[in-house]
Image (cartoon, helix red, strand yellow):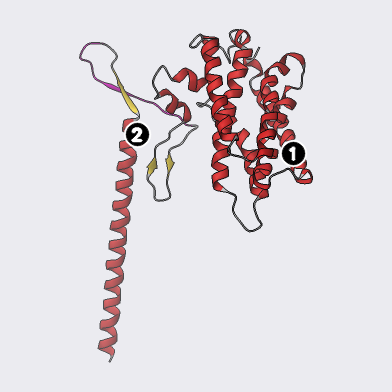
Amino acid sequence: MASTVTMIQTRVRVSRAVYRACTWNMSTACCRYRNECEKTFLRSKWRYTSSSPTLSPICLRPVVCPSRPLRTSHNGWILPRVSAAAVVEAMPKTVQPYLRLMRLDRPIGTWLLYLPCTWSIALAAQPGCLPDFSMLALFGTGAVLMRGAGCTINDMWDKDFDKKVARTANRPLAAGDITRFQSLVFLGGQLTLALGVLLCLNYYSIVLGAASLSLVLTYPLMKRITYWPQLVLGLTFNWGALLGWAAIKGSCDWSVCLPLYASGVMWTLIYDTIYAHQVITLSV
């Protein structure tokens, strides 16, 4: 009996040792494989430079960005970082000025226009149900088009001013990449597509959406006559808080829509004022 117990204990010890060895070998192999992946990725971020045109030793100069660390997935794989600006840069040269005119290389404005729409669409959904994804997609398309149209109108109004400001001198109209007539034709195309999106909604929403066009057209002029252009921007950017509810319910419940709209306007006042202070030295 004692010999049997001793034999079982010995087998258990051997099994544990084998398990530890296998586990250590697997983890070591995974770590080595991951390190090789990181080295390969980092190696692709190095570029070769030569100190002279003669056959001198090649030296490596790393391209580093400490403020933007490598992105990894949950299993350790390194993910590529793709920015909107890089996508625009990859487009044909003849198309790039129009995409930059729409600010597609800086999509934060589109998100700020789109978010109030999602709030009201979500609030208007039936209790216990998810928001209408087709409506979210429709409003997302409209946000891209109307934000692009608003930026086009803004640049057409401010072309002469933009040339004198360092922050805006590289905008397509100010830099002379496209003419004012070309931007006008492009604006007509954007508004036509936006009208097509609007016509997919109910009649009440069509009228309500068309009413926002006056704000889109006049906002750029507010910067010339008032110290509170952010207020007009808030009224414009948060119109989707009214439109999203109307698109789902068929009309606006003002007891819900007005507080939501007002809170969105206050939110815009805050973030646009912060942004104005951040770029104040570049806007003089």
Residue at position x 29%, y 86% from top?
5
Extreme-bottom residue of the structure: 1
Label 2 CA crowd tier, 10 Å (few <14, some 14–19, many 20+):
some
Tell me where residue 249 appears, x and y as whole percent: 68, 47
In this rendering, does residue 111 appear at all?
no
Q: Give the residue type that dot 1 points to.
A: Ser
Residue at position x 62%, y 33% from top?
113
* Residue 148 lies within the magenta run: no
The magenta region covers 53-66
Above or below for 14 versus 33:
below
Identify the residue under disc 1.
263
Q: Give the alpha-carbon distance from disc 1 to disc 2, as whole Å.
A: 46 Å
Label 1 CA crowd tier, 10 Å (few <14, some 14–19, many 20+):
some
Left/right placement of residue 283 relative to residue 183 reads right
Q: Secondary structure at mark 1?
A: helix
Front-most of 135 and 91? Answer: 135
Tell me where residue 211 appears, x and y as whole percent: 70, 29
Query: Considering the image in quadrants, where does the N terminus appear?
Result: bottom left
